[in-house]
Amino acid sequence: MVLYTSPFPNSFLSVLHSFSWGLIFPCYWLADRLVGSFVPTTYEKRQRADDPCYFHALCIIITTPIYLALLVASLPFALIGFLLWSPLQSARRPYIYSRLKDKNHANGATLLTEWKAAGSGKSFCFGSANVCLLPDSLARFNNVFNTQARAKEIGRRIRNGASRPQIKIYIDSPTNTSISAASFSSLVSPQAGDNRTVNAGIKRTTSMEYKGDNCGSNGEENREDKGGSGEPHEGEENSCIVRINGEENGHMSDTETDTINGQARASGPAEPPLEGDVEISKTPNHKQKEGDSGSLDSCSASRESLVKVRVGDGTVDQSTVNNKLLYKASIMKKTSVRKKKHTDETFDHEISAFFPANLDFLCLQEVFDKRAAEKLKEQLHHYFEYIVYDVGVYSCHGCCSFKFVNSGLLFASRYPVMDAAYHCYPNGRGMDSLASKGALFLKVQVGSTPQDQRIVGYISCTHLQAIAGDTTVRCEQLDMLQDWLSEFRKSTSSSSTANPEELVAFDVLCGDLNFDNCSSDDKLEQQHSLFTHYKDPCRAGPGEDKPWAIGTLLDPEGLYDEEVCTPDNLQKVLESEEGRKGYLVYPTSKNHSSSQKGRKASLKGNGRRIDYMLYTEEGLYLEWKVEVEEFSFITQLAGLTDHLPVAMRLMVSTGEDDP
């Protein structure tokens, strides 16, 4: 399948389209500014609280006639532009595929090595977020504003969070010879050759510096220089592995693990103090960056993601292990191992202030504004080499009703895209019918076997009908989604059962489905057959989420409250039940109104979880096993959108031993 790298098949149509949009844009911009001036956000209201009450009214009185006059003057040009623009949409392609040609531009990204399926397995990390990048006047109805600046900031936060290095800590348990992987922490950046295991009793020195955008060619040279280091486990790019001895009971000792003057020590009581030491030293050129605690240039890790330790025969209790590490140049911040409250769960789950390290795939919804999409793409290309954006159809072509905006879907990947397809839901209603909401289906190549068989994965991203009460519409869209999924798999498969040319490693579906698993009004969606084919890691069953799962829809009125306006603050609030009740939208029931304030005892679940991350074991290579390794609710976009991003890490086990 040919991937479309431009919206039109030839340059003449592209120039004509640019000319027509140039005629439309002044009218569009003026209308957006005019409407936006009458819809203030709570942030703007607070900023104006100290101004005289007449000041804002005076500004509106002055600017409104100016906007109206210019709007009327631009209407004839907009009409001519529309008459040119609308017919051109019949020749427009359904998406644009962008591939980063200059690899030096991807400063924060780790160079990927092709997976040869020779080890025991490989992990893949998926992220999904609704970023609410609507035209500014419409975004204000969700209490967010300044779409262009938000797009750039969202892109910077995502790629800075994902490009942080990954540390894995292993615990050797004397009562169990197996070794359990523990941490996906991302504080310490390994230098050249650090992708190797550090045995207990050996001091390990590595830089605390994360250079982010400034790592440049030096970082790439370091990554290329692997001389003298062991080969990393497959799927563990940019990771530093530390192995520490445990006690006989399978738990770490009560000895406090301190990092003072750049040293982190972990030892058991029956061992000399130096046993198991890991020394972490700051390089002289380390500089504190603004925006720590989860903002765009942060190089620090969230409190609970700094260290997560599991042993072979049990979980390390939170109260037994403390860790002090250097948070900024002169600040010591104490953190402790997060206790897994639900021991029957087979994977880690957390509320994190950062996107996961080594994020491989990203699916975004509501990237409706085309200028914002360009800014977002430019930022994401610092980390993701392959991006599919401007997905959807316009005008009356491809769907039943007129479409003013695209689908809002965007896909970013560190692995090459082999095939892509888009389908528009034809049954949209109300305001949703003005957008070409649909589903984007992608096939990516993640490696190859020694026998030259391609290893591929399938990822689908969608956004369903949003209007409350449209249960029938969403169920119909889920039916279409299943049919399109099956059709895409069949049309892009080049394998036969007898002689497979490619092996399928994973099949993931994510997006904003606009229903939750606890609301009484969403029972039909909760019982849809999609959930018999795809697994939801957060779901215990129809109408019931697992105890640790939380809602992903934030109460728009509280977005700019001091308690939740930063990633760290929002993380702390969402870790408590009372905090969630104050700042998350909760499932509705027929007996209660949708108002959140003042309603505590009757709330069901932990908030409305409408952003999903699903996976299936059907249709995969039979000799491989897919398991969830980690699931995260992410607060790094606090103050930028009214949704919580979610992330899932899958482990594809091949059943073979490490080489």
Image (cartoon, grey):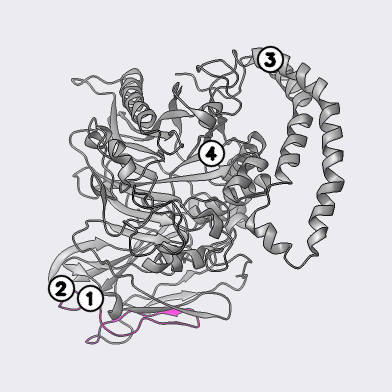
Dot 3 falls on a residue whose secondary structure is helix
| Among the two numbered marks 4 and 3 on one chain, the one whose residue lies closer to the N terminus | 3
| Among the two numbered marks 1 and 3 on one chain, the one whose residue lies closer to the N terminus | 3
Q: Label 4 belongs to which residue?
A: 366
Frontmost residue, 452 versus 588: 588
Using the image, tell me which numbered label, if any, was put on residue 246.
Answer: 1
Q: Mark 1 or mark 3: which is in front? A: 3
Q: Residues within 10 Å of mark 1 (few under 14, many from 20)?
A: many
Circles 2 and 1 in contact, beta carbons < 8 Å: yes
Circles 4 and 3 in contact, beta carbons < 8 Å: no
Which range of residues does the magenta coloring cover? 247-270
How far apart are labels 1 and 4 at the CA level?
47 Å
Quarter of the figure that contains the N terminus: top left
Is 399 left or right of 590, judged from the image as shown?
right
How far apart are labels 1 and 3 at the CA level?
67 Å
Dot 4 falls on a residue whose secondary structure is strand
How far apart are labels 4 and 3 at the CA level?
27 Å
Is residue 265 on the magenta stretch? yes
Instruction: Please report the residue visible at 49 percent of the width from the left and 44 percent of the height from the top.
Output: 130
Instruction: Please report the residue visible at 41 percent of the width from the left and 43 percent of the height from the top.
Output: 113
The disc labelled 3 sits on which kind of residue? Leu
Q: Position of residue 222 (x, y in %)?
A: 52, 56
Q: Label 2 belongs to which residue?
A: 174
Is 32 left or right of 598, judged from the image as shown?
right
Q: Mark 2 or mark 3: which is in front? A: 3
How far apart are labels 2 and 3 at the CA level?
69 Å
